[in-house]
């Protein structure tokens, strides 16, 4: 298999990546055949899976605009994945070109591609770091000089915490980030859930464990809500992806009552 020019040396082209699978579901082009195959197999199990990806992306954009309206001018996007249309820096810097955005991902393909599209953007950057090692991640963010932890920021944990296994304490990782950011900061979380469609969640969870080896955790609402402990949730709280402050019918990629994702936005008091 030929290695694409955008793929760094050392990347395993035979192992699916969550970032590249998500890119494939969104119709992107920075993925390998193994990622497309995994996404297609997931869609065969649950045909509306691509709608879930679109719904999640729409929530991200709405959450960022909400934070901008609240005065936030620096954003830390952890588990950012491979940039697609409507990236955080595009949404943010359309309003304020001086606002700062730092993308963080564990996937080197995502980081390399992010750096490529950001090369002419002095107020945006990308680094490779692991959310499971929150102390190292926070130190790496500080080293960039892009994010000032002494000022309020917008923390984005969109479609990443369901990749953190229970043994790695995802709620504890959020708590460590809460401790690091300044009062007045916001957090946005989206997470795959078993709450509304346990059978479909079970199918996809088994597929991720046995076929793709990605290990996605579909969690109940109570476990996802626990991740906001210490934060002040804004209305409407922890809800389905299409139900968080929809702005138009274009946001309704999924039918309410059917989403496989929950989300919320909260503020540090």
Image: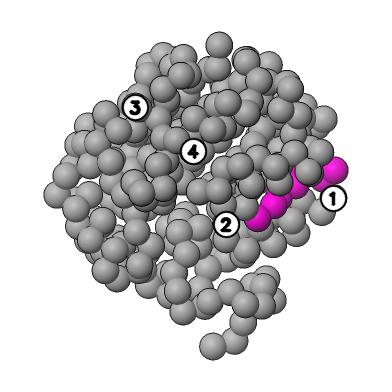
Question: Which one is nearer the viewer's eye here, 54 or 122?
Answer: 122
Mark 4 to mark 3 CA distance (whole Å):
14 Å
Horizontal and vertical percent position of residue 157 = 51, 38
Would residue 234 appear left or right of 28 to someone viewing this image?
left
Q: Which residues are magenta?
A: 121-128
Query: Looking at the picture, does residue 208 appear above or below residue 238?
Result: below
- Circle 3: element type: helix
Contact, mark 2 vs mark 1 (Cβ under 8 Å): no
Mark 1 to mark 3 CA distance (whole Å):
38 Å
**Which dot marks residue 42?**
none
Mark 3 to mark 2 CA distance (whole Å):
25 Å
Residue at coordinates 55% horizontally, 17% vertically from top-left? 268
Horizontal and vertical percent position of residue 197 = 18, 42
What residue did someone put label 2 on? 106
Contact, mark 1 vs mark 4 (Cβ under 8 Å): no
Q: Nearer the viewer, mark 2 or mark 4?
A: 4
Residue 180 occupies which quadrant of the picture?
A: top right
N-terminal label among 1 and 4: 1
What residue did someone put label 3 on? 225
- Find out whether residue 163 is within the magenta segment: no
Query: Looking at the picture, does residue 172 appear above or below residue 107?
Result: above
**Which dot marks residue 120?**
1
Would residue 65 appear left or right of 33 to someone viewing this image?
right
Mark 2 to mark 1 CA distance (whole Å):
23 Å
Residue at coordinates 55% horizontally, 11% vertically from top-left? 269
N-terminal label among 3 and 2: 2
What residue did someone put label 4 on? 173
Neighbourhood count class around disc 2 (C-alpha, 10 Å): few under 14, some 14–19, many 20 upward: some
């Amino acid at each position: 298999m030929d290695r694409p020019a955008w793929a760094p040396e050392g990347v395993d082209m035979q192992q699916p990546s969550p970032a590249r699978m998500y890119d494939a579901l969104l119709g992107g082009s920075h993925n390998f055949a193994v990622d497309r195959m995994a996404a297609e197999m997931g869609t065969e199990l649950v045909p509306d899976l691509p709608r879930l990806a679109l719904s999640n992306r729409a929530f991200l954009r709405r959450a960022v605009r909400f934070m901008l309206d609240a005065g936030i001018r620096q954003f830390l996007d952890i588990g950012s994945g491979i940039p697609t249309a409507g990236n955080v820096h595009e949404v943010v810097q359309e309003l304020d070109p001086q606002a700062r955005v730092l993308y963080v991902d564990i996937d080197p393909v995502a980081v390399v591609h992010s750096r490529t599209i950001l090369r002419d953007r002095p107020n945006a950057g990308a680094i490779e770091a692991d959310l499971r090692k929150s102390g190292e991640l926070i130190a790496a963010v500080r080293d960039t000089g892009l994010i000032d932890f002494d000022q309020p920021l917008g923390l984005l944990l969109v479609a990443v915490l369901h990749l953190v296994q229970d043994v790695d304490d995802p709620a504890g990782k959020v708590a460590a980030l809460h401790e690091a950011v300044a009062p007045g900061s916001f957090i946005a979380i989206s997470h795959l859930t078993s709450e509304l469609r346990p059978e479909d969640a079970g199918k996809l969870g088994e597929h991720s464990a046995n076929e793709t080896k990605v290990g996605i955790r579909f969690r109940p609402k109570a476990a996802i809500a626990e991740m906001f402990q210490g934060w002040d949730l804004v209305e409407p709280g922890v809800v389905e992806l299409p139900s968080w402050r929809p702005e138009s019918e274009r946001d309704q990629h999924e039918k309410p009552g059917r989403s496989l994702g929950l989300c919320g936005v909260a503020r540090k008091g």
